[in-house]
Amino acid sequence: MTDTATKPTFTPGTLVSARGREWVVLAESEADLLVLRPLGGGDDDTAAVFPALESVEPASFAPPTVADLGDASSARMLRTALRLGFRSTAGPFRSLANLAVEPRAYQYVPLMVALKQETVRILIADDVGIGKTIETGLIITELIAQGDAQRLAVLCSPALAEQWQAELRDKFAIDAELVLPSTVTRLTKGLLLNESLFDKYPYVVISTDFIKSANRRQEFINHCPDLVVVDEAHGAVADSATQGSRTQRYELLQLLAADADRHLILVTATPHSGKEEGFRNLIGLLDPALANVDLDSDAGRAHLAKHFVQRRRADIRQYLDESTAFPKDRETREAPYELSKEYRALFDKVIDYAREQVVGTDGVAVRQRVRWWAALALLRSLASSPAAAAATLRTRAKTADATSPEEADAIGRATVLDTGIDDTAEAADVVAGADGISAEDTGESYLTQRRRLLQLAVQAEALSGPKLDHKLAALTKEVKSLLADGFDPIVFCRFIPTAKYVADHLNSTLGKGVSVAAVTGELPATERLERIAELTAIEGRHVLVATDCLSEGVNLQEHFQAVLHYDLAWNPTRHEQREGRVDRFGQVRDVVRAVTLFGIDNQIDGIVLDVLLRKHRAISKATGVAVPVPDQSDGVIEALLEGLILRGREDINQLTLDLGMEAKRDDLHRDWESAAERERTSRTRFAQGAIHPAEVLREVTAAREALGGGDEVAAFTEEALRALGATITTGGRLVDGFSAVTTTLPVGLRDALPAGHAEPLPFHAEFPVPRSEALLVRTDPHVGALARFVLDLALDSVTTVDGYRRPARRAGVIRTNAVATRTTLLVVRFRFHLDLPGSSGTRSLVTEDARLLAFEGSPASAQWLTPEGADDLLDAEPDGNTAPDQAASMLQRVLDGIDQLTPHLDGQAHEAAAELLDSHRRVRGSAGAAKRGLNVRAETPVDIVGIYVLLPATGGATG
């Protein structure tokens, strides 16, 4: 029988020696199986050891020795190398060490709101361009890091699926699978019996078109992850007037939200659809009680504030001690043009044709509505371009197969008008079609109708080119003006034929040095960003022509600074979304521009401008908020358009009076102004009711102090590479970055760098980063390999490697004007054992933290400095020489008294643990379950990683 009584037991957080090195025992360990992480190593270096089969002994972390003496930069480099190895923090935001982004202070607010809930239910409704994806990613990574969520599904439009996948991968280290109709075969291959792809792949980004079919939708419901994100959530909420796919999506979300334990994050910049019922249904997904709560009462507003974050740019442009670099101004301008005589003649002819269609009767109500929408589609496409008009005339109307007037109106409003647009609908840029001939129509009347449509199509095509199409000529002038002023524009068109027509013309007109590309809904979603990347990779200036498939969710601010509305959107929100592609966080220009083309003598444009777009801008300017147009706008616009068709050419103001629409238009505008004022007031009431800035400042400051910032990573990387023999080059395409020749680095480091990296290796300061290149963030594998190599060398006993001295040394003695008496700076490592309650039980974790401590005098009579005082010593520069024997003697005197520091160091560790526990409790606030069982304990003794003695440069006490 084996005697196990003498076998040592190891608690999580303790140090052990095995396989020739020191390890930290992790919380997953059991008595007969130890899970170990090497000191200074990451999660990828974790190993499992059977004590019965391998020798495992208690260990302690040895302090530095005289052989570890280095230069003045050693302390700074050692602390950074140590901190870069941490993959989680001991504080309440455990995931921050794994992020490739440094969140702005205001972006922590949604996370803090979420962590106060046992089950996260939150609507993030910040303005366009503030960074909702970053805010959402913070919540996702934190829930996963804390064990509150094991699986993730992001529901988004097909056009945004690939971007979501890239954001999760590049910035949050979450490798999600794309679930698209084109990927399903690959993902389902090899599934076990009764296994779903949602079980096999823990993190997925799902396009809304994938779950349209009933069987796919039911499979998703049955195997839905415990964390669901819904992007552009306003497009998935229905009301009593909604039909079709939006109703199906809303029913799906209701089923998902019915599971009280499922985390649900809704994301949209436009939570109000202009319909109170739609907004109530949206917030009702977070908590059913919110669907009917009195939001005019203090209690109702407080209830909503627990689940709702909505801020304007003005709210966060200056937040706490940070300024966020949004563009300071958006210069907007209208650019008018007049129709050519030939274009005007075709317009009149089309209006005459439309009038015949609308007033004609065959005794069937549905046919009248079909003809009405076909006529309106034709007028709108003719206002867009000859190409769109010709395509519309040759295309069967979308409403042609409607079986009732109500169905024809629903299809018509979805495909012709933008006022009730479904933002996730496919083919939103396809022409609606003007051929409303019934499938049962035959004979001479049918042939006559078809010939007339084709004749109009030929006449439309004859107007192509800037000579007869003055709109195209005006565009050319405006684009050249923008380019001359230093702005690369995005030209937004309503229809695919128009986008192609415009792009072809600009390609042939703008000349060398300007590259033009078109992106439309014809391209699969996965190829749209590739087309943009190909365009912007070409040296010189760029013009992007796009339909509204790019008007939401896509970040274009890096390469473009202006938007030109070639076609008016019949929804002011769509205009705002278009302009938000360039007017957003990350735009380097202080000023962006938005130019709107419109026809002076084109009544279609006149109606939309007068009733909708100009009023939208006026309201936004007056109130500082943008709200969707109210419900009744559909009726006003349709009535005015019908009046235009029936009366022909007529001034828009006169038309409004003649039809008695003036009162209705004014009522619409008053309702709109009231909605904007309510929205402005609601944002003031709800935006930050649950989180106060002081709370954010305290927790964000602590998190940043624990991990360091991007500047620290960049300085460390460049300094370490230089010290290890790399040649560094700055400038060129690497703005604020550099490139490093790695062939001269030590063999061990070259082997540790990711295989296949570029040579020389570019280090970028910001996204995007091409494949095989590096980003100056803590999570980049190239930076991580360098930090591990530097730390391993510092902890090793060798003095040089491949002829180069160790960049970071564990000890140093310098003379400096930064101190007036002998001062000792310590780099210490605290280890903490965390018990974190979660939805699936309590998790025990081991985390580490690097701190700086400093004292004046000898260890026996140490006078300890404040944390700020210790931090300041990191930047101390040498102002005098210290002889090697004197340096060794000074360091040895500290080492001889090091045991006398232990009580204070252990006390500091326990104080830090108590502070961390308070921080966890503060952040979780009202989440009662999170408080029960929550605990933070310090493991002692504390590891003294580095000792640096600072002596006065001249005079002063050195004893």
Image (spheres, rainbow, N blue to C red):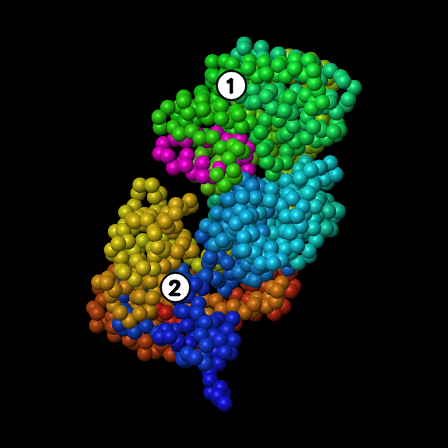
Q: Which of the pair 623/398 is nearer the observer?
A: 398
Q: Is residue 547 magenta?
A: yes
Question: Which residue is at a point 41% across and 79% down the rendered structure image?
Answer: 54
Spot the residue most to the right. 363
**Visible in this render: residue 902?**
no
Q: In the rendered structure, which disc, 2 or 1, sits on the residue that comes first in sequence? A: 2
Q: Which residues are magenta?
A: 528-552
Whether residue 386 appears in this view of the structure is yes
Depicted 517 relative to depicted 221: above or below = above
Say the numbered circle drawn on residue 82: 2
Residue located at (48% from left, 81% from top): 9
What separation in Å lies between label 2 and label 1 (alpha carbons)? 62 Å
The residue tagged 1 is 471
- Residue 261 drawn at (x, y percent): 66, 58
Seen in the image, is 494 located left or right of residue 784?
A: right
Amino acid beneath label 1: Lys
Residue 434, image x, y percentages? 63, 22
**Residue 950 against residue 57 in the figure, above or below:** above
Instruction: Please identify the quarter of the rendering in which residue 733 is found.
Output: top left
**Label 1: how many residues lie within 10 Å, few (<14), some (14-19) or many (20+)?**
many
Q: As rendered, which of 758 and 923 lies closer to the eye?
A: 758
Label 2 crowd bin: few (<14), some (14–19), many (20+), radius 10 Å:
many
72 relative position to 779: left or right = left
